[in-house]
């Protein structure tokens, strides 16, 4: 039990602490569709995602950012389960994005973000259990447009906090991007690391490894084997190939496809201990969308 608890905390920390950091720092708008069919089953996991951030210039090199993100998660559970699956088939995750960034000096930019979240089935009136607080601070050294460098790079260092992990302290965040040459570049970090090849100004492909998932409160929870369920969580480790088409430098269409190395969809009690495993069979993974970024 202790080992499972520690393993759960580590996976959830990695996913929830870092899952949307890069998007919230660089994406102004995003529409996305994700799909995971269960192997040898009619069960399916679908996620629809919409994000919008609006930067407001305060002064030179200083911006206030206000935005929001909505995720609708649909669990099509067609197999026989010892409870009513209609109580958990739709999950809503709503984030408010509030941020501020300014140029610290010639080399570094500083950013801070605050993200109140609702993560719930939303079948009843909202309660305190449906609300979570996320946030973070970041130092960004972006030299990707520096023509004096042979291999331009971008380094992001920070601390992030997420109430859904159950840990009362922030965790570190690191992301490092670098050009290898005119065609190749890589990004090392969490939740995604990749190696990208650029064919031309419009097309590129990449190999990637990444994390995905969520944790949410169940407002009308089922009782499973005599245990009251309070939360549902999904954690995924996935690898595969991706393709991006650049309409412009900032407007990008993308398609990622691969296979999960780890998939764990679990019902949990109020202490977030595992009560019932909905699925742990690795499966095909698809994510596609359109984004407008800085």
Image (cartoon, rainbow, N blue to C red):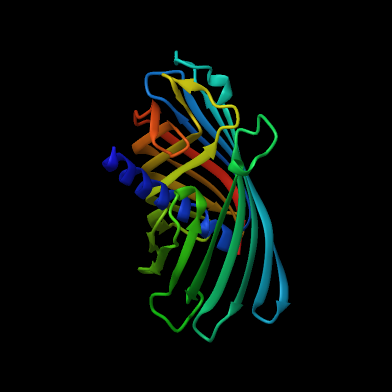
Residue 250 is at least partly visible in this image: no
Q: Quadrant of the C terminus?
A: bottom right
Q: In front here: 121 or 26?
A: 121
Q: Position of residue 38 (x, y in %)?
A: 41, 25
Q: In front here: 225 or 157?
A: 225
Residue 131 horizontal side relative to residue 234, left or right: right
Q: Residue at x 39, y 69 (%)?
A: 178
Quadrant of residue 240 in the image?
top left
Q: Residue at x 30, y 39 (%)?
A: 4
Q: Quadrant of the N terminus?
A: top left
Q: In front here: 246 or 189?
A: 189
Q: Residue at x 58, y 59 (%)?
A: 24
Q: In the current view of this chain or complex, which residue is farthest to the left?
A: 3
Q: Is residue 253 above or below residue 156?
A: above
Q: Position of residue 11 (x, y in %)?
A: 37, 47
Q: In the current view of this chain or complex, which residue is farthest to the top?
A: 80
Q: Position of residue 177 (x, y in %)?
A: 41, 66
Q: Residue at x 52, y 61 (%)?
A: 201
Q: Is residue 129 above or below residue 244?
A: above
Residue 60 is at least partly visible in this image: yes
Residue 279 horizontal side relative to residue 16, left or right: left
Count of numbered labels shown in the rendering: 0
Quadrant of residue 237 in the image?
top left
Q: Position of residue 274 (x, y in %)?
A: 38, 33
Residue 151 horizontal side relative to residue 102, left or right: left
Q: In front here: 253 or 236?
A: 236
């Amino acid at each position: 039990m202790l080992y499972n608890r520690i393993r759960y905390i580590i996976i959830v920390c990695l996913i929830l602490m870092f899952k949307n950091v890069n998007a919230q720092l660089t994406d102004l708008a995003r529409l996305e569709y994700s799909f995971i069919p269960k192997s040898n089953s009619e069960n399916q996991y679908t996620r629809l995602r919409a994000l919008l951030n609006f930067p407001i210039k305060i002064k030179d090199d200083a911006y206030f950012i206000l935005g929001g993100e909505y995720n609708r998660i649909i669990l099509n559970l067609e197999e026989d389960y010892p409870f009513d699956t209609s109580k958990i088939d739709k999950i809503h995750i709503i984030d408010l994005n509030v941020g501020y960034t300014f140029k610290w000096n010639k080399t570094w930019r500083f950013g801070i973000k605050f993200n109140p979240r609702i993560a719930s089935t939303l079948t009843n009136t909202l309660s305190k259990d449906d609300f979570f607080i996320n946030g973070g601070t970041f130092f960004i050294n972006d030299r990707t447009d520096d023509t004096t460098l042979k291999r331009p790079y971008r380094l992001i260092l920070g601390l992030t906090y997420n109430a859904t992990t159950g840990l009362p302290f922030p965790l570190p965040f690191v992301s490092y991007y670098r050009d290898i040459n005119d065609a190749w570049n890589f990004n090392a970090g969490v939740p995604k690391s990749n190696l990208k090849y650029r064919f031309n100004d419009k097309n590129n492909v990449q190999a990637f490894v990444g994390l995905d998932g969520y944790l949410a409160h169940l407002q009308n929870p089922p009782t499973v084997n005599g245990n009251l369920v309070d939360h549902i969580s999904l954690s995924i480790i996935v690898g595969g190939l991706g393709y991006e088409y650049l309409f412009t430098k900032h407007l990008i269409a993308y398609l990622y496809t691969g296979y999960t190395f780890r998939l764990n969809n679990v019902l949990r009690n109020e202490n977030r201990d595992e009560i019932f495993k909905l699925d742990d069979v690795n499966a095909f993974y698809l994510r596609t969308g359109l984004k407008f970024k800085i």
